[in-house]
Image (tube, rainbow, N blue to C red):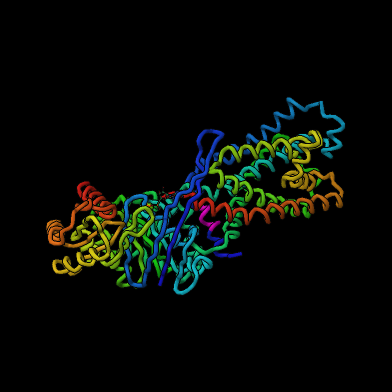
Amino acid sequence: MNFKVFCATIKKGIQIRIRAYPVSFMVGCILTSFYTILGSYLMYHYFFLGQLSESFELNARTTDYMSYAIVGSLMYQFIVRTCLNVSRTLITELREGTLESLMLAPFKRTSYFLGNMTMQTVLTIGETAVAAVIGIAFGFRISDFNLYHFIVAISLSLYGFFGLSLMLGCVMLYTRDTYISQNTLFAIIFLVCGITFPKEALPYCLQLFGNVIPVTDAVTLMRASLLGGLTDSEFLYLGLQEFILGTIYIVAGMPLMKHVEHIALEQMEG
Amino acid sequence: MIEVQNLQKIYNVKRRQSFFKSYKESIEAVKDISMKIEAGQIVGLLGINGAGKTTTIKMLTTLIEPTSGTYSFDGINAIENPSFVKNKINMIAGGERMIYWRLTAYENLWYYGQLYGIDNNTLKNRIESLLQMVGLEDKANLPVETFSKGMKQRLQIARGMINDPKYIFLDEPTIGLDAVVTKELHDEIRKLSKVREKGILLTSHYLAEVEELCDYIYLVNKGELVVEGTKKDLTEYVYNRKQYCFSVQGMDENIIMRLHNYLISLDIDVEIVQQDDRAIITSKFELSSALAQFAIKENLIIKELYEIEPSLEQAVIKLSQQICREAESIA
Ligand SMILES: Nc1ncnc2c1ncn2[C@@H]1O[C@H](COP(=O)(O)OP(=O)(O)O)[C@@H](O)[C@H]1O
Ligand SMILES: [Mg+2]
């Protein structure tokens, strides 16, 4: 870990972000939050209202569907914004012509990625907080808050999302695509990771698929820390699972990223 | 000292034929290049577009690995120690890449300085002196987006100096710049080498640029060295050199030897190479009538006698002169 690179990357990210679109940045942030909440509200009123079955209550561990969906949506917004921007960093450097000058410097990539992740997390936490406040107007209630669980849930989520961003970043840099890969991933996450409905409602094979994405457990953990519904041992078990999954993604992602960087530099003409 | 030997680079590329079909292709961008760069020296790599200059520079900067060949950097195997090399080199490319447009000049240099782990006080002083060196001290806090091409290029030079490198690689640094800015840049480059003792490798497709700046020149074409030498060597090579193909019935080594003895009285530096039953003669002088006389005197029947068209390498040079002239007429 190189602290200089870490801090400088955070600073650079914020400078670029703010200089690029200060107004649209703020407006965009608030609008995204609003739409996210509105989405879960509409989903609730037009699809689920009065039709929540016993099996939902059993799997969701709560009867407050609105809060259930809002926590899911907030997490989803958080993943989309974080993953998206973190995985895009290298391909953005490539497109803006700074990848080579970056790679000319003999620094450790981990600090660079962690810097970007931290910068993005700080920005997204701000956005998510705004969204949470909007959510309250739509009926979001924190019914069973547990601070320790919350801290564990946040840390493990970030850990898992970092791994996921690395992987997505590899795919993006390798395919030189930022559109198809990211949107496919986000659609899959929305479908199989228990964002607005319990994943148990899905066919078994899709559930398995959801289990290997380090988002499913993160969402469940976060929900439990805000709305309750999990015993301590269940929480611990899921937490461990999320930690292992995140570790696998990071351990595989770092060398893979190095390899993909290599390929990207080889493919660069001129 | 930087020394590379028999550098080769093959790119393996996948080409898409249709949506479903793709095929693999190998492109030998650099076939065989050997060169040396010493501190305080400006070395030129001259060649037309596609000659393999950028690929060579990328190998020297360890951005890509050579397919084969050796690379010794101050006595250390550079291919196995890229971090060691990276600390002591930097690269400046033509065009407007390699700097963040959304950051200011100062912020750019500061960020790159952090990547090299330079301590903050040293960095602050270095940035100030670099900005002064490239004449951007009063533009330090403006975003790069607002800069002209020449200003961006000068900022890139400052960026390329941020880690106080021992060797600097310049890949067509004056491309797209007008004559006045080009001249300023040439002065900067010369200062880097003569005042600051940097070893510099400069690529260009302008003969005039290389001639003006470089102490030693390598001419490359299709990934191979064609000729190398000082400016004087190269000028002689290009301007005062004729080649003849001469062949007679019953050509053998004996005849070649007698031919050599005969021609050496006309040109002491004459070179004769035997290729099958032909002699390829290289000389500064017009020798066709002398060759004919030699055949008559020796009673030989001439099969072939002609002046060889300016060879590929000469074509390269002619072309680069032409490009240069065009560039001057635009500027
Ligand atoms: N990344 C790459 N992948 C495949 N072919 C490449 C790549 N880079 C360069 N080439 C090819 O290699 C040759 C040499 O290119 P380059 O080194 O860029 O030449 P120059 O800098 O002298 O113009 C060209 O034919 C070019 O098309
Ligand atoms: Mg080039």
**B261 left or right, relative to A121:** left
Given residues A172 and B115, the one toward you in this image is A172
Magenta extent: A9-14
In the rendered view, tell whether residue B250 sits above or below residue B39: above
Residue found at the far bottom of this picture: B75
**A124 left or right, relative to A221:** left
Residue in the image at 40% along x and 55% along y: B54
Residue A208 in percent (x, y) is at: 78, 41
**B109 left or right, relative to B20:** left
Q: Is residue B273 magenta?
A: no
Quadrant where the N terminus of chain B lies?
A: bottom left
Residue A70 in percent (x, y) is at: 72, 38
**A37 left or right, relative to A202:** left
Does residue B137 appear anywhere in the picture? no
Residue A128 in percent (x, y) is at: 65, 44
Residue A111 in percent (x, y) is at: 59, 60
Count up the numbered dots: 0
Residue in the image at 56% along x and 38% along y: A179
Q: Is residue A13 magenta?
A: yes
Decide whether the magenta segment is chiefly helix, strand or loop: helix
Residue in the image at 74% along x and 47% along y: A218
In the rendered view, tell whether residue A222 sits above or below residue B4: above
Does residue A201 appear anywhere in the picture? yes
Residue B256, image quadrant: bottom left
Residue in the image at 74% along x and 51% along y: A245
Residue A262, image quadrant: bottom right
Given residues B43 and A152, the one toward you in this image is B43
